[in-house]
Image (cartoon, rainbow, N blue to C red):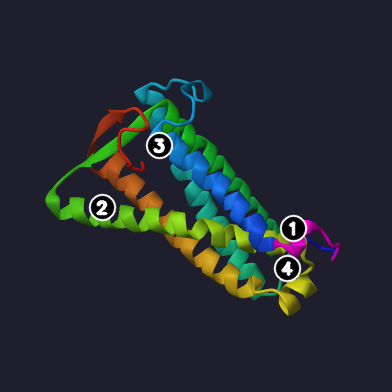
Amino acid sequence: MATSSADNAAKRHPLAVTGLLSIVGYAAVIGTFLGAVPGSVFPELSLWEVNRLSDAIAVVNAANVVVIAAGWRWIRRDDVRKHAAAMVTSFLLILVFLVMYLTKIGGGGTKEFVGPTLVYYPYLAMLAIHIVLSIVAVPVVLYALVLGATHSPEELRRETPHRRVGRIAASAWLFSLALGVLTYLLLNHAFSWEYVEAAAAVLVIR
């Protein structure tokens, strides 16, 4: 996060930068699902490798829940330095997740939940909320990060909506990550699944 008040284009136009970054992120994910990203970009994965990537993604997301919660606690204690470090770490974990996730979808496939009806519909509901929050939270998270990276702590408090936006971003991302880990456990460990090869086949996460 920024510690100076140096002027730059990103600082003057944070919404434009946020919009551009959001478009790039959405394009990467949608392009992978629809098969628009060349297959040579991703390695061809076996089912075993897909499963190991699923495990790794769950670990990264669980770690990110802890990091975001710690960052939230630190800013409530007015420990700006630790809060900023936590948020940067969280963003790096998001990037690690994105690389692994797109590799899993683009080079392997998806898994469909197989379980009793009593669990199936709650699973779908949690998955749907997870997906919607993930989509909606992207620009909010990026906006909070852009503001934090381009303004000093004093400017963030006086001149920007960083505090309000950050609270919304952290809440949405925490809930989305927690649901993602829970659906992973239900799909991969508590019940069964069917494997669907090819990323463009179905819009299913984990």
Q: Is residue 48 visible?
A: yes
Secondary structure of the residue carrying tag 1 is helix
Q: Tell how many labels.
A: 4
For badge 4, the amino acid type reads Val
Q: Residue beneath label 4, please?
A: 80
Give the mark nearest the N terminus, 3 or 4.
Answer: 3
* Point 50% across, 20% down: residue: 40
Q: Of discs 4 and 2, which sits in the foreground?
A: 2
For badge 2, the amino acid type reads Leu
- Marks 3/4: CA–CA distance: 38 Å
| Location of residue 152 in the rendering, given as x and y in whole percent from the top left corner | 79, 67
Q: Is residue 21 above or below residue 83?
A: above
Secondary structure of the residue carrying tag 4 is helix
- Marks 4/2: CA–CA distance: 38 Å
Give the mark nearest the N terminus, 3 or 2.
Answer: 3
Quadrant including the N terminus: bottom right
- Marks 3/2: CA–CA distance: 19 Å
Residue 146 sits in quarter: bottom right
Estimate how packed mark 2 is, as few (under 14), some (14 to 19) or many (20 or more) residues with alpha carbons within 10 Å: few
Q: Residue beneath label 2, please?
A: 124
